Image (cartoon, helix red, strand yellow):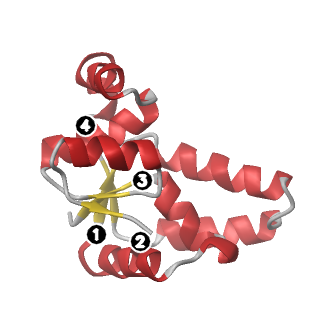
Amino acid sequence: MSIVLDASMTVVWALADEQMAAAQQVLRQVVAEGAIVPAIWGLEVANAMRSAVRRGRCDEAYVDRSLARFARLPITVDPETADRAWGRTRQLARDEGLTTYDAAYLELALRTGAPVASCDRLLIEAARRRDLVVWTA
């Protein structure tokens, strides 16, 4: 897997007003080499897209098309996310001042040694403190 991909980066790809050249580079990397995500990724992406509909940024048909495109990407869901939730992930959340959701991405990156692709400021800062490579938009 090339990177640990978080939901914030994924959602940037779908929302035209948020697309940036750096985010498109991450997308190209994922297409070429794949990504790995914690088990919560799909729920977070779906929730963010649902919020975009509620805010009038897109409609449900657009969300359906976007999620179908995401489903075709070479993204592997980590099978160990839940097993680490109450241990290492919770500890990282406390140590770094993160939500446990964001700490799940950090834990996965630390465990795999993969770079983190994120637009979340707190996750980016925590990953850098832990000497991880960070890709951001």
Name the kind of residue labelled 4 in the image: Glu
Q: Disc 3 vs disc 1: Cβ atoms closer than 8 Å? A: no
Q: Based on the displayed image, in which of its 4 quarters is residue 111 positioned?
A: top left
Q: Identify the residue shown where x is 35% and y is 25%.
A: 93
- Disc 3 to disc 2, C-alpha distance: 14 Å
Please tell me whether residue 79 is drawn above or below residue 29 in the rendered image. above
Give the mark nearer the N terminus: 4 vs 3. 3
Q: Disc 1 vs disc 4: Cβ atoms closer than 8 Å? A: no
Q: Residue 67, which numbered label?
A: none
Give the mark nearer the N terminus: 2 vs 1. 1
Name the kind of residue labelled 2 in the image: Leu
Q: Which of label 3 and label 1 is nearer to you?
A: 3
Give the mark nearer the N terminus: 3 vs 1. 3
Q: Residue 73, which numbered label?
A: 2
Give the mark nearer the N terminus: 1 vs 4. 1
Q: Which residue is mark 1?
A: 34
User: Residue 99 vs residue 90: left or right?
Assistant: right
Which element is circle 3 on? loop
- Disc 4 to disc 3, C-alpha distance: 12 Å
| Image x and y of residue 13, in percent | 55, 72
Q: Disc 2 vs disc 1: Cβ atoms closer than 8 Å? A: yes
User: Residue 11 vs residue 40: left or right?
Assistant: right
Q: Residue 107, which numbered label?
A: 4
Name the kind of residue labelled 3 in the image: Asp
| Image x and y of residue 114, in percent | 18, 56
Give the mark nearer the N terminus: 3 vs 2. 3
Which element is circle 1 on? loop
Q: Which of label 1 and label 4 is nearer to you?
A: 4
Q: Which residue is mark 3?
A: 6
- Disc 2 to disc 1, C-alpha distance: 7 Å
Q: Identify the residue shown where x is 33% and y is 73%.
A: 30
